[in-house]
Amino acid sequence: MAREFSTVGVVGLGTMGAGIVEVFARNGIDVVAVEISAPALERGRATLKGSTDRAVAKGKLAEADRDALHERVHFAVGLDALHSVDLVIEAVPEHLDLKQRIFAELDRVCRPETILATNTSSLSVTEISVATSRPNQVIGIHFFNPAPVMKLVEVVRTVVTAPEVVADVEALCARLGKVDVTINDRAGFIANALLFGYLNHAVGMFESHYATREDIDAAMKLGCGLPMGPLALMDLIGLDTAYEILDTMYRRGGRDRRHAPVPLLKQMVTAGLLGRKSGRGFYTYERPGSPKVVPDEATPLATDGAVADGARAIAKVGVVGSGTMATGIIEVFAKAGYEVVSVTRGAEKSAKVCEAVKTSLNKGVVRGKLAEADRDAALGRISWSATLDHLADVDLVVEAVVEELSVKKALFASLDEICKPGVVLATTTSSLPVIDVAMATQRPADVVGLHFFNPAPVMPLVEVVRTIRTSPEATATARAVCAALGKTGVVCGDRSGFIVNALLFPYLNDAVKMLEASYSTADDIDHAMKLGCGYPMGPFELLDVVGLDVSLAIQRELYLELREPGFAPAPLLEHLVTAGYLGRKTRRGFRDHSHR
Ligand SMILES: NC(=O)c1ccc[n+]([C@@H]2O[C@H](COP(=O)([O-])OP(=O)(O)OC[C@H]3O[C@@H](n4cnc5c(N)ncnc54)[C@H](O)[C@@H]3O)[C@@H](O)[C@H]2O)c1
């Protein structure tokens, strides 16, 4: 029979502690909530009150239940109040010496049978446990932020944690309505080991002015379906906590440079810019603790997208190519009211593309998303051609031909001869340097990347890539066009992977390395990212959808360009590709899809 936990103690009522108190009290468990000082205690109490009041306001918690919840919580300053609890969860700042001191003290104060748990994200549970005389009763219970919302709990057992303690804690998680994954004591466990390299990389992009905070966050939200962008997430985690986690992971996790905190982080922490909790981090908040972002000096001015920043007027658009992307892009422009000239390599190809666009538009009609008249008008705006000469009077060309530099360069050289001056020439390349294509013309200032996502009619994001030769007007034009298409254009520099792939694929590759090291299973890793971080798909689900060969190619490009040792493709990924296990398209990748 699993142990009954009727009273638990929580030490530290900051970002995590206050949420953890709420989780227990909501589930009928009495809580002794402890802080270091009276003011800190009051802050913790206010956080709990704010959170439960919001739940009541949203209709997620009845008033009576809120009141009962608060009655279950006893607040106290100092650890002595924990003398008779069944379990303690520590959630003080991420410093080993502080945690060891607290555990030594808890060991003295608490009853001999009490389980002592830490909510550490990156420190060694084993090192914390040896500060007590009961290391076999010490365990990691790692909640996710915000604790009342996120379903996942990582239960961390050390080599000495007693099996029955693990079983009791697993049963407790189930009682709290959480899903647990039980794992060994390794820096960052599952989720943070995969998350923090990505977060730090995003901070590095921001620090180097590769893209703005809004664009980095929008790219990951819209391009990957994440609940929030990396910089907004850093603000939620707390930059001081994030700094400590990175620093610990760097030192414990094999000195992977990707975990060496980006210098800007330290500066922000020193300056008191800790994120939401201090009212300012990467963004500015209404007040300390508030989730509401308010405009500040870095907030971009709202524009109507049409004539902003010297954007040129665009009425007629040429689209070159006959593949999936070209087809989707033709549809997107035609639906948005642009005159479109489609250029393919022959009448047969044009007929195929035309058919595909019709089929897609018809689907919209059947689903009730598009009126028949609008479909007909969109089709009427497209003209079909097999020669580039018909692009002489367009205002914008979007190239979406095969991903080969020589082919694209030759095409841009021809466009340079045919198109009128002032035209914006865009490539949809996802992996080639845009500057190489730009330099095939005599007008590199007018060349940009317009990286659409697949399927183009559905995906709301476009990466606007500016090279070191791109003019501000061409960039502004590209961005305004994205807005007119109803999409979000994010502007970034001309580096391998732009924003989304550069941040996404190393994370996927790290997940493969974690699986390869047998730290956890594909199912648990997928669970951890979905339930702990709100990802729409786990890394292995996503890899199987994207295709392992495509993923490997992107990861190789990143590695070759940036020479970052941590970006080296996981050997397991290479082996699966060699074996022909490419994901759903071959019915086998990380998982077997033959029966689904
Ligand atoms: N922030 C996150 O997203 C997140 C997520 C999961 C786990 N964690 C982990 O949770 C722990 C707490 O992180 P946080 O972000 O909540 O930190 P925080 O800085 O928001 O809160 C820490 C709290 O501990 C209190 N405290 C400090 N010394 C104390 C003592 N001696 N006795 C009692 N209370 C004391 C502080 O007053 C503060 O209120 C860390 O180990 C962190 O790695 C954080």
Image (cartoon, grey):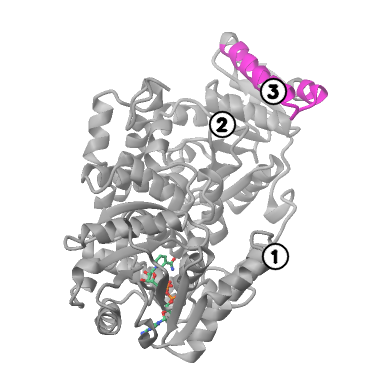
Quick one: which residue is furthest to the right in this view?
373
Q: Secondary structure at mark 2?
A: loop
Q: Is residue 293 in view? A: no
Marks 3 & 1, CB-CB < 8 Å contact: no
Residue designated by label 1: 57
What's drawn in magenta, residue-wise? 349-377
- Quadrant where the C terminus sits is top left
Q: Which mark is residue 361?
A: 3
Left or right of 23: which side holds 95? left
Q: Secondary structure at mark 1?
A: helix
Q: Which mark is residue 455?
A: 2
Residue type at the position of mark 1: Ala
Mark 3 → mark 1, Cα distance in angstroms: 42 Å
- Quadrant where the N terminus sits is bottom left
The quadrant of the picture showing ligand 1 is bottom left
Residue 577 picture location, percent across and down: 28, 28
Quick one: which residue is furthest to the front in this view?
1
Which image quadrant is residue 592 in?
top left
Residue type at the position of mark 3: Leu
